[in-house]
Image (spheres, grey):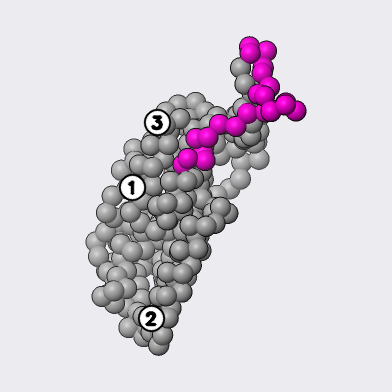
Amino acid sequence: MAYAAAHPGKRFWHNATQEGILNDCLALGLGSFVDWESGQCRFASEDFKEFLAFVGRFPEKLEPDLSDDRSNARRVRDGDILLFPVRISDFEDIQEYPEMFQTPVTYIGYPTTEGSGCIADCSGALALSAQSANKEAAWEFIEYHLERQSDSKAVWGFSTRKSVLDRQMEEAMTVSYYLDDEGNPILDADGNPIPYGDNIVMLDDDEWLTLHTPTEEEMQFVMELIESASKVQGTNSKITEMILEEAQSFFQGQKSAEEVADIIQSRVQLYMDER
């Protein structure tokens, strides 16, 4: 909030509308206001009212500037967009952003009421229902599934299994070279072996980057980011729908933030009680 206030006239991030900011922040910080374990929510809190007031500063929709054909990455580099969301799913990914923005990059994480941090975006996550009549069998299946992952090489992103993640690190740092028919490395004009499999990514409309085999320092940095991901991305569509619906009366000046927060508190708590 302080960062946005210190840069008036600048776009907060690419999707800086009332609904966009609210959706993004709830997808990453709903757990700050909803505790499923205790069955309680806290939308009548002062920090949620402040959050509503913050979201209300942004426009309902963004009018496209047809005279500006820059990409969002270029707008960040030019200082017109303050924050840029990135997803890191490979050890090479962190090579892109310093080159994209032509400046050192800080992975500050998404804002929440408990501070900032990286968010884990889990693919294929499994859960055991508290209402399951077969918890023991369900847990055996989850264990079986996780054990099979150790034999799988088709893991997208970073594995949650330590042994597989270690193997991913080892494979990422292994350099392969082009070989001739006799199995000898093919050399470039300077007499050096030519690496095989370097990926080329587009940074912008007219800029390309050849990714190199990650260094040990880069690998360690990625591991630190993984270890710092203390929250998991995810939201509850029903609760988000309630909040979006009730927040409109505040955004349109019909009710105060306190009135809207109390209504949201009542509706969401009733929904949680019914579950």
Q: Are marks 2 and 3 in contact (CB under 8 Å)?
A: no
Q: Are marks 2 and 1 in contact (CB under 8 Å)?
A: no
Q: In this view, does 222 lie above or below 212?
A: below
Q: Which of 136 and 241 is in front in this view?
A: 136
Binning the other alpha carbons within 10 Å of mark 1 as few (below 14), some (14 to 19) or many (20 upward) gives some
| Image quadrant assignment for residue 210 | top right
Tag 1 or tag 2, which sits nearer the N-term?
A: 2
Q: Which mark is residue 228?
A: 1
Q: Which residue is drawn at 58% across and 48% down?
A: 63
Q: Is residue 156 above or below residue 78?
A: below
Dot 3 corresponds to which residue?
Answer: 217
Q: What element carries label 2?
A: helix
Amino acid type for the residue under numbered disc 1 = Ser
Region in magenta: 169-191
Which of discs 1 and 3 lies nearer the camera? The answer is 3
Amino acid type for the residue under numbered disc 3 = Glu
Q: Do the residues labelled 1 and 3 touch (CB within 8 Å)?
A: no
